[in-house]
Amino acid sequence: MIYQRKIVPSAMLVIKTERMINLKKFKSVLLSLSVAFSLTAVTPTVSAAGVADWSFNNWSTASKGVTKIYSSTFEKPSNADDTITISGWQDTGVYDSVNLKYSIVEVGWFGNTTYYGTTQEVSSNVPKSGNWFSKIFSNIPTGKKLAIEVRCPDANTLPVSGAGNAYD
């Protein structure tokens, strides 16, 4: 019995030591990943000035009567070129698709809306898990509070979900 007691504590010591070494390796790997993730997370903020985003879930103009939604607002910096690129997805979840129109707008008081560039249409399902659509808008002014307008021109009965981003 005394002999067995001496083996068990030493075996436990070996296990504890291995766990401590593995914990140190784990902390080291975790720290490396944290630093790498931090550097990656900073990159889009620096390289994509004037970013806006939008999202909608089961949007149906037939049931809710809302024909337009807007992204978060953004202002183009004065040193930027005159283009905005949007990238996104839209999907009804079924075979039939919905035609949605995307515009760059300045929304004024009392619903006055100024449109910039050419309104562009996406008339197919573009799944979130697939290749997103991309549209480029030109002649977009700087120094104005802008937004992306997503409009459903038809009184559709299919709910549609989607999201996207705008970049300088």
Image: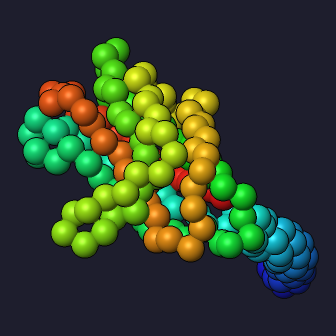
* Above-or-below relation of 95 to 114: above
Q: Image quarter for residue 34?
A: bottom right
**Camera-nearest residue between 25 and 121:** 121
* Above-or-below relation of 96 to 19: above
| Residue 23 in view in this figure | no
Q: Position of residue 133 (x, y in %)?
A: 56, 33
Give the position of the C terminus as an image quadrant.
Answer: bottom right
* Above-or-below relation of 90 to 125: below
Q: Residue at x 34, y 15 (%)?
A: 95
Q: Image quarter for residue 109?
A: bottom left
Q: Residue at x 67, y 67 (%)?
A: 49
Q: Position of residue 16 (x, y in %)?
A: 83, 79
**Camera-nearest residue between 118 and 166:** 118
**Camera-nearest residue between 138 and 100:** 138
Q: Position of residue 35 (x, y in %)?
A: 83, 75
Q: Residue at x 46, y 34 (%)?
A: 120
Count how many numbered circles sit on residues in the image.
Answer: 0
Q: How is the image coloured?
A: rainbow
| Residue 131 in view in this figure | yes
Q: Position of residue 11 (x, y in %)?
A: 87, 74
Give the position of the N terminus as an image quadrant.
Answer: bottom right
Q: Residue furthest top?
A: 95
Q: Is residue 165 left or right of residue 4?
A: left
Q: Residue at x 61, y 41 (%)?
A: 136
